[in-house]
Image (cartoon, grey):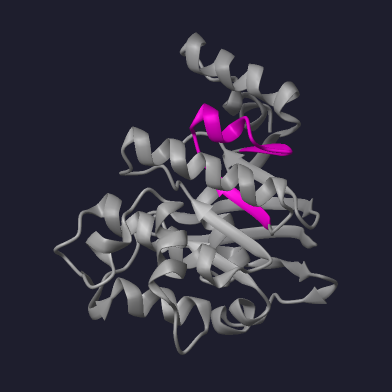
Amino acid sequence: MLELQNICYRVSTPEGELDILRDISITIPDQRLMVFTGPNGGGKTTLAKIIMGLVQPTSGRILYNGRDITGLSITERARLGISYGFQQPPRFKGITVHDLLRLAAGRDKLTKDQCCAYLTKVGLCANDYLDREVDVSLSGGEVKRIEIATILARRGSLMIFDEPEAGIDLWSFARLTETFEQIHREHQAAMIIISHQERIIQLADEIAVIAGGRIAHRGTTEEILPLILADTLGGCPVLNREEARS
């Protein structure tokens, strides 16, 4: 179980102090699928990076399975089973897709069939990709899908995906959505997915709308999705109204 307690994140700018996250508290039980959504710049990615340890909060605590991990490094959190997929994944010249999957799985050897199983889940053919380097020869969408495949190979207990739909074609997106649904259905891991896509939002057990550095709304899909759709269609988002009241 993941617990965020009063998480704040403040940065210094030439104009003064700027609050990126403001007193966010949320609990995500095991095997739960939580979607973070909301307007761009609201703090979703910063919050995800704080969970992974890429960014340290200004104040607040992070507990994972009862352990305070606030001061732990990225590596230490990864060893506890937390995985992270970036909006723009890094590239690794000289490392093949096969190498990357093997490293992610923590095995000396990974058969072609095993690699194929992971790549198929993200809409890629093993024959076309296993021996290719994860470098600039691959498109952004291809690197994105390969990174998601490595997260699946790692089989962590908490998987964080930052806008997994970015740069992915419709067919692969449909396949990826099915994969998320399968992971959730089979209780393989808890998932946090940052997304604006309705199809992914509909998979969630719970949705947190993050706007202005705060949780503006939180609830089930049935409760929150109509608010999101109303914001989109209305052209004057209510997502920011709670911020306006503060």
Q: Quadrant of residue 206?
A: top right
Q: Is residue 42 visible?
A: no
* 218 to 74, vertically: above or below: above
Percent x, y for residue 123? 37, 48
Percent x, y for residue 194? 53, 45
- Decide whether residue 194 is among the magenta residues: yes
In the picture, the quarter occupied by the C terminus is top right
In the picture, the quarter occupied by the N terminus is bottom right
Q: Is residue 3 left or right of residue 217?
A: right
Percent x, y for residue 144? 35, 56
Q: Quadrant of residue 212?
A: top right
Q: Is residue 75 left or right of residue 130?
A: right
Magenta span: 190-209
Q: Is residue 132 visible?
A: yes
* 192 to 80, vertically: above or below: above
**Which of the pair 90/181 is nearer the observer?**
181
The number of callouts visible is: 0
Residue occupying the far bottom of the picture: 108
Residue occupying the far left of the picture: 137
Q: Is residue 135 left or right of residue 5?
A: left
**Which of the pair 137/194 is nearer the observer?**
137
Percent x, y for residue 21? 60, 52
* 103 to 38, vertically: above or below: below
At x 82%, y 70%, the residue is 65
At x 68%, y 27%, the residue is 245
- Decide whether residue 177 is among the magenta residues: no
**Which of the pair 102/225 is nearer the observer?**
102
Residue occupying the far top of the picture: 234
